[in-house]
Amino acid sequence: MALYSEKVMDHFRNPRNVGVIEDANGIGEVGNAKCGDIMKMYLKIKDGVVEDVKFETFGCGSAIASSSMATELIKGQPVEEVKKLTNKAVAEALDGLPAYKMHCSVLAEEAIQSALKDYQERTGEKILN
Ligand code: FES
């Protein structure tokens, strides 16, 4: 069996939503101290919905695929749903990741949480529990 699913390879080769949102109102940056990978997530939230999302990831293929899939899962979704997104859901949407690569999907969950927290701090709007 191939180590990585077709979906992981596809999102690694053709990542969706790469880049920067200049007028983002929620920005999160997280890193993994062990591997040194860094993920930055930009959210544009309006009327309780993630209207746009982009990412920049300096990291391994699984981290790039996880960021890409995570942006697809949250784009156009209500914040109430977005805040519940787990790394497990990201990995499942990619048809799985090898066990030792699960931490790469954790970065995606953390980057989104960090961007939501940033949004909350900037706007004073309570969206996280
Ligand atoms: Fe560090 Fe993948 S090896 S995020």
Image: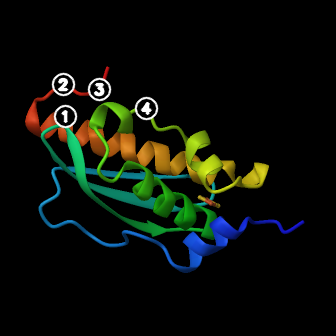
Q: Which mark sits nearer the N-terminus, 1 or 2?
A: 1
C-alpha span from label 3 to label 2:
6 Å
> Residue 29 in the image: x percent, y percent?
36, 53
Image quarter of residue 122? top left
Q: Could you tell me which secondary element the residue under label 2 belongs to? A: loop
C-alpha span from label 2 to label 4:
15 Å
Q: Nearer the viewer, residue 116 or 92?
A: 92
Reply above or below: 9 against 92.
below
Reply above or below: 33 against 89.
below
Q: Which quadrant, please, contains the N terminus?
A: bottom right
Numbered tag placed on residue 80 in the rendering: none
Q: Nearer the viewer, residue 39 or 73?
A: 73
Disc 3 + disc 1, Cβ < 8 Å:
yes
C-alpha span from label 3 to label 4:
10 Å
Q: Could you tell me which secondary element the residue under label 3 belongs to? A: loop
Disc 3 + disc 2, Cβ < 8 Å:
yes
| Farthest top residue in view | 129
The amino acid sitting under disc 4 is: Lys
Q: Residue at x 34, y 42 (%)?
A: 114
Disc 1 + disc 2, Cβ < 8 Å:
yes
Reply above or below: 116 against 23.
above
Image quarter of residue 79? top left
Q: Which residue is mark 3?
A: 128
Q: Which residue is mark 2?
A: 126
> Residue 90 in the image: x percent, y percent?
56, 48
Q: Which mark sits nearer the N-terminus, 3 or 1?
A: 1
Q: Which residue is mark 1?
A: 120
